[in-house]
Amino acid sequence: EDIDGLRAAGLTGEEILEGVWVACQFNAVDRLADTFGLYDLMQLQER
C-alpha cells in the first residue's frame, strides 16, 4: 500500500529505493550515536 501511494505520486522504483536507503542509513547512524552516547554532534569536536 505504501509503495502504491508513492508510485501514484509519480516516484520511480529507483527513487523509492533511494528513499528507503537514506532512511536505513539515518537509522543506523542514529543507533550508533545512541550506543556511543552522542546526543549532540558538537560532542564529536570535543573529543
Image: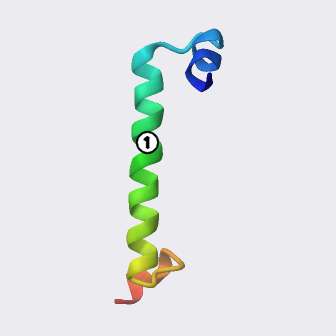
The amino acid type found where label 1 is placed reads: Val
Residue 4: x percent and y percent? 60, 15
Image quadrant for the N terminus?
top right
- Which residue carries the number 1 mark? 22
Position of residue 7 in the picture relative to residue 30 (left or right): right
When the figure is inspected, residue 13 is found, relative to residue 36, above or below; the finding is: above
Residue drawn at point x = 45 percent, y = 84 percent: 37
The residue located at (40%, 62%) in the rendering is 29
At which x and y percent is residue 24? 42, 47
Name above or below for residue 37 compared with residue 12: below
Question: Which residue in the rendered view is the most extreme toward the bottom?
Answer: 47
Locate the C terminus and report the quarter of the image it occupies.
bottom left
Q: SS for tag 1?
A: helix
Which is nearer the eye, 38 or 44?
38
Horizontal and vertical percent position of residue 2? 61, 26
Quick check: 37 above or below 11?
Answer: below
Give the quadrant of residue 9.
top right
Task: Please provide percent x and percent y for residue 14.
Answer: 39, 19
Q: Residue furthest left?
A: 47
